[in-house]
Image (cartoon, helix red, strand yellow):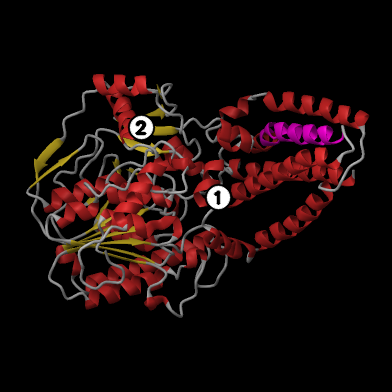
Amino acid sequence: MIGAALLVVLLLMVSVLRGFALVGIATGLTDCPWCMGATAIQQDASLLALLLAFTGLSLLTARYWLQLPWLLLSALLLLAYALDAVLLKTLVQHLYWLDVVKFGKELDAIGRFGNVLLASSTGKLMLVGAAAGIAVLVLALLPRPRRPRLALACLVAAGACFLVGLWSPMTMKYINYPLLQNFIAANLADSVDRHYSTAYADALRKEYAPPAPVCVAGRGLRPNVIVIAVESLSMYHSKLFGGVNDDTPRLDAIAQQNTWFPDFIANGFTTDSGLIAMITGKPPVPTLGRYQSAEAFAGFESPQGALPDIVRAHGYTTHFFTTGDLGFLDKSTWLKGLGFDSWEGAEQPFYIGWKRRHFNAAEDKALYQRFLQWLDTHQDATPWLAFILTVSTHPPFVNPENESLDETGAFRYADKQIGMLYDELAKRDFFRNGVLMISGDHRSMTPLSATELARFGDSALARTPFVVATQLPVAKGAVAGKFQQADIVPSIAELLGDRACRKIDQGTFLSQPPQPAQYVAHARGDRRNQIDIYFDGKQAELVLAGDQSDWIGPKPDNWKQIMDGIALDRIGRGSADENFLDLMINARAPKPAQPAAPTTK
């Protein structure tokens, strides 16, 4: 019986800790952060109800084999709840079942992330808590005596807690209300993978009239191009872009000397979604089943219209550089399928001797030095495009200079390395006929600040700095208009081609003058079934729910066309697992021999 009692006490302790975490997240964002913490605890009453119900059912019989299912369910509930609390503390998001499927196979990356976290004081406290929790779980799995009266009391208490958990106070209208929900409610509320019926899909195909593409004369230039995706780079890190912090003085200076976009949108909320937008030119609106698939790039495997396809038509080669493990989320298969000429990560011999951290990655300094080594030995006159993905500023934000868990220090370090790369490129006269683009891969998985919320509202969750540096004739200074990661592909296409066409949800920032998209789509991370639509200075929400999908908020004249087009695109991409199976087959098919490179087709 002591195990059952300790299990309830442990759940209550985790609930209180989650409440305190929400107080910290909400401080500065609301008039009553303690109300947010109290609401989180109140919402978690439903979890306490489940645990009490499992406990009561286990006490109705003395037979252990009949008790065991309820004991295991109790242990699983507490384990999942504790993991949810850890994710809330480290990544400010819930434990989603679909993320377990997606990241569950990445045991090495999870282990390295855990090692980095456990090196901190917070991690050590978590380790002590985990040890105590394991002891409690062992006790909770021991046989229990039959106690029918106590069982009845537990079931009555469970009913009362369940009713408390059903209440939806005014605080549930908070902008980040999903964080207040308990993790089971957050998962049940997600309708993103609800399928469209055959009748609905057939009706859409019959009625839908696609918008005409936007075609313009291109510029016919042939610069070398570097695109950098900086892990977790956000508006609040930059003083220039409106943040309270001054963590990126070099980036800000580069922006002021060149071109910067104060109203720039990251199309997704994770690194894979940022890569999808920046490399394929498509917003990462989830394929049906993508979030319940183990394959992060499912539905976005087609090379048609992606960066390698666009630039190869003009005689370019394409190269991908990172220090992280390319096996994580199977990036190498995806990059190969898209047609990159080379790709390299943690396995690159240059990184031997460098300290490895999460994702087995060496620090950003090593990444840029390796790229410069490649650049200095690349004697081919063929124009090229290089895509660089950084890792050092991934949570939990370890500063490579002193190994401290320090977000400010980590970003100041990353900024210093960006400045170093910029200076080295300038020494090589790269900018005379070269373009450097710098963007965050997504907004950091950290709480919104009061300044961000006041300045940007709900769209703060979607914003990241974006800078273009070149001596070529492009717009200079701050460029007004809502541009996005998905604009990189059509902008490069317009820069290189004599004529270029784009979709209405794409813009071109290298044209003269720059042309923003008619609308911008952002796939949210806190509400997985919601796509934010930005248009004409307004924001609406498209709720993905199969046949019951709905448009909420202000509507442009062609809102139905936008909504139906997104639905048909999702339907046309098929299911996630089927698409990835096709990718695996195609990627492993024999290919023509290619020139030697770090990793080639």
- Give the vertical position of 19 relative to 133 (above or below): above
Marked residue nearer the N-terminal end (2 or 1):
1
Q: Residue at x 33, y 52 (%)?
A: 585
Does the rendering let one see residue 478?
A: no
- Give the vertical position of 143 relative to 469 (above or below): above
In the displayed structure image, the side of residue 400 where residue 39 appears, left or right: right
Does the rendering let one see residue 77?
A: yes
Segment colored magenta: 39-59
Residue placed under numbered mark 2 in the picture: 533
Label 1 amino acid? Leu
Residue 363 rendering spot, x and y as whole percentages? 44, 70
The verdict on residue 52 being magenta is yes
Q: Residue at x 76, y 58 (%)?
A: 131
Residue placed under numbered mark 1 in the picture: 91
Q: Main secondary structure of the magenta part?
A: helix
The verdict on residue 417 being magenta is no
Q: Quadrant of the N terminus?
A: top right
